[in-house]
């Protein structure tokens, strides 16, 4: 199958060392399979972004950027109105980043560098200092490490039933010790398997499932206290603390920003 460039991409000058584009997308914006002349870092300020490759899909909340190497076919989907930044990376600089598409977590410094470019609406790196800042941004992303999925999966015979149950019911509060008894293991062994197979702890994985479900309910204007109850939190403040730790925002601020951006 032959994949095409978007006309807007062909009008972008060659990155030296990067070139930044700024857009605003409405809810449920979809882009069919296409390719870019250069590697691309995609960042949204709110909600979820999905990138689909020919063999897999990446889902990322706004705390991550998605890296797609140059000339790799992919489709893109944005579910909530969001400000979007596309950073095209020169071939030379792209060599510092992974060879295939992945998620990269944004550290506070990475966010600050992005935000500075956004505030000044810098596109071409005509100023030598901006070029150095762009190189610093890419270097920090390269050092941040990659994730193949925000919500990784596993076919491990002991983990698979746990992951399936929590996906079906994010409010499930079964402890890791209780799960260990059910799958004929020990809490310590399961904890090691979560880290080895998924790269996150049991609680971190469950919180990610809950966050994704909460984001959907926030878009549907479900009240925060109702979301907390649906997800089996003892108090709304406990849910708010989890949400803030995951996103950097309170649920209401997240929802308010979504309204403003829409």
Image (cartoon, grey):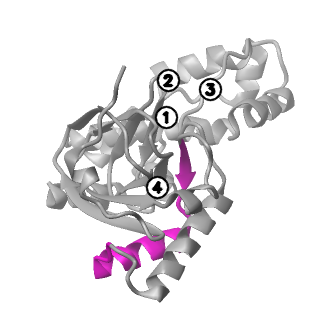
Q: CA distance from mark 4 to mark 2?
A: 21 Å
Q: Closest to the observer: 236 or 219?
A: 219
- The residue pinned by badge 3 equals 174
* 50 lies above or below 26: above
Q: Residues within 10 Å of mark 1 (few under 14, many from 20)?
A: many
Mark 1 lies on a secondary structure that is helix
Q: CA distance from mark 2 to mark 1?
A: 7 Å
Q: Closest to the observer: 258 or 227?
A: 258
> Magenta span covers which residues?
102-123
Which quadrant of the structure image shows residue 180?
A: top right
Q: Position of residue 2 (x, y in %)?
A: 34, 25
Which quadrant of the structure image shows residue 217?
A: top left
Is the residue under label 1 in contact with that under label 2 (CB below 8 Å)? yes
Q: CA distance from mark 1 to mark 3?
A: 14 Å
Q: Closest to the observer: 14 or 220?
A: 14
Upstream in sequence: badge 3 or badge 4: 4
Which residue shows up at 14% across the image and 54% down it?
Answer: 262
């Amino acid at each position: 199958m032959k994949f095409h460039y978007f006309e807007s991409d062909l009008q972008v000058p060659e990155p030296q060392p990067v070139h930044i584009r700024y857009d605003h997308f409405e809810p449920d914006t979809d882009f069919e399979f296409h390719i870019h002349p250069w590697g691309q870092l995609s960042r949204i300020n709110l909600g979820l972004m999905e990138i689909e490759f020919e063999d897999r899909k990446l889902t990322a909340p706004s705390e991550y950027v998605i890296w797609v190497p140059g000339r790799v076919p992919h489709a893109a989907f944005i579910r909530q109105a969001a400000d979007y930044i596309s950073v095209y990376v020169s071939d030379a600089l792209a060599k510092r980043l992974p060879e295939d598409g992945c998620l990269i977590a944004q550290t506070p410094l990475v966010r600050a560098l992005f935000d500075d470019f956004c505030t000044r609406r810098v596109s071409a790196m005509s100023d030598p200092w901006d070029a150095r800042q762009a190189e610093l941004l890419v270097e920090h992303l390269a050092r941040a490490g990659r994730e193949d999925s925000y919500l990784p999966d596993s076919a491990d015979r002991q983990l698979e039933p746990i992951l399936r149950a929590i996906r079906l019911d994010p409010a499930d509060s079964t402890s890791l010790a209780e799960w260990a008894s059910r799958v004929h293991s020990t809490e310590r062994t399961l904890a090691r398997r979560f880290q080895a197979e998924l790269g996150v702890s049991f609680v971190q994985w469950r919180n990610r499932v809950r966050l994704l479900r909460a984001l959907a309910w926030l878009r549907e204007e479900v009240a925060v206290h109702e979301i907390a109850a649906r997800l089996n939190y003892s108090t709304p403040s406990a849910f708010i603390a989890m949400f803030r730790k995951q996103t950097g925002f309170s649920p209401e601020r997240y929802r308010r920003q979504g309204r403003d951006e829409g």
